[in-house]
Image (cartoon, rainbow, N blue to C red):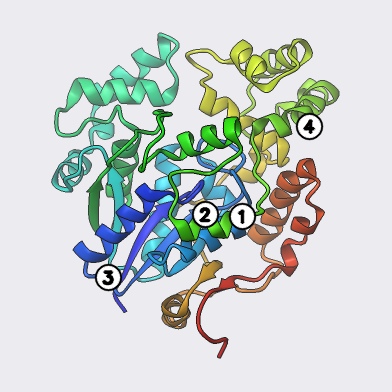
Amino acid sequence: MRMTAIISEYNPFHNGHLYQAKIARQETDADLIVAVMSGTFTQRGEPAFTDKWTRARAAVASGEIDLVLELPFYFAVQRADRFSLGGVTIAEAIGASTLSFGSECGEIEPFIAAAAENQEAHPRYQELLQLGLARGLSSAAAASQAFKAMTTTLDLTTPNNTLGYYYARAASTISLHTTKRIGSGYHDLSVGDIMSATAVRAHYAHHRSLTGLPKQTSEALQNSVFTSFDVYYPFIRHRLLTTPLDDLTQFNGMDASLVPRLVEGARKNDSFESFLSAVKTRRYTRTSIQRTLIYLLTSTTKQEMYGLSFDQIDFVRPLAFNDKGRQALREIKQRIPVISTFEKHPWLIKESQVTAAYAVPLARYNVLEEHRRFAYFSGKSSK
């Protein structure tokens, strides 16, 4: 079977995702579409809108996604290059022919050309990067400015182009395909037929209704429990205010200068937004702080992350699939182990801990039983 992979979060699956999957299927001549999807927390360090099992089921319900595989926590909550490398590693491990992604550019040649330039290896790039960091820019902002100064091949100041660039850098055996993003951009909160996931979540927060989603997806999300960082802030605040400073520095993302800032912010601010406004800087951006807080919430240490290889994976885990997806899993099993039931794999033990960190603040104790969850099958039979 000819598989096209999409690295995704589907937070939640909206009409723009439906459009991308349809175009990817048509233009890559795919027999099926496989989504490699973030689990409980997202790349920008946010709690997912709803749990991974529900989001995966909603994606398959759309009729355009045939199989959803989990992007492990260690790959999912990461800066763009590591997130991309982890996703591409899985896509290649399962034997996908093509990786498709949305982009502001809409043409694949600039991505391939920019990846071939390998600007990061040039001394001038490193010089510009260090200058940006010295001015107090975050690593992502400094890298973006360094790229902009050195190349006109591709605009890397936009989020989807940036991910696409790192997909191209990571790709080895897989072909690349891109679809021009239509409708709202990531930070655009306008309401319409094709909205950003951010806008969908913001609309729900204000109106308690879902809009901009395919009908089947909306139906699959009915009665779901939706969340935001506000729910988790009391738990994060408690840990910041009750954990010794030296112990806090053991968690991934915590450095000696950031820890006192976070503790002071937690002491003075009752809400998550006021806390974040107080602690973020050009160096410590909203996204980087959010990732750090997720590492704290999930007790993810620097030692735990040390030496992690983002280009290696020894299993894949399905979250949802239809009949075509089930057929694909039979083929995938010939290439890499497929773990459909909970096993004592170190990464799955971690997923269980991460799920607990997500579920307890929501009082969703049934979700805690990660070891009892099975992939959702939407096919016609169970044979």
**Disc 3: which residue:** 30
Q: Residues within 10 Å of mark 4 (few under 14, many from 20)?
A: some
Three-letter code, disc 2: Ser
List the residue tagged with mark 4. 235
Dot 2 falls on a residue whose secondary structure is helix
**Dot 1: what SS?**
loop
Q: Residues within 10 Å of mark 1 (few under 14, many from 20)?
A: few
- Contact? badges 2 and 4 (CB < 8 Å): no
Left-right relation of 158 to 111: right
Direction from residue 368 to residue 342 in the image, left or right: left
Q: Position of residue 73 (x, y in %)?
A: 58, 50
The first of marks 4 and 1 along the sequence is 1
Q: In the rendered image, which residue does mark 1 sit on?
A: 222
Residue 125: name its quadrant: top left
Q: CA distance from mark 3 to mark 1?
A: 30 Å
User: Given the image, on which type of amino acid does mark 1 rest?
Assistant: Gln
Label at residue 218: 2
Which residue is pictured at 65% across the width and 32% down the height?
229
Q: Nearer the viewer, residue 125 or 98?
A: 98
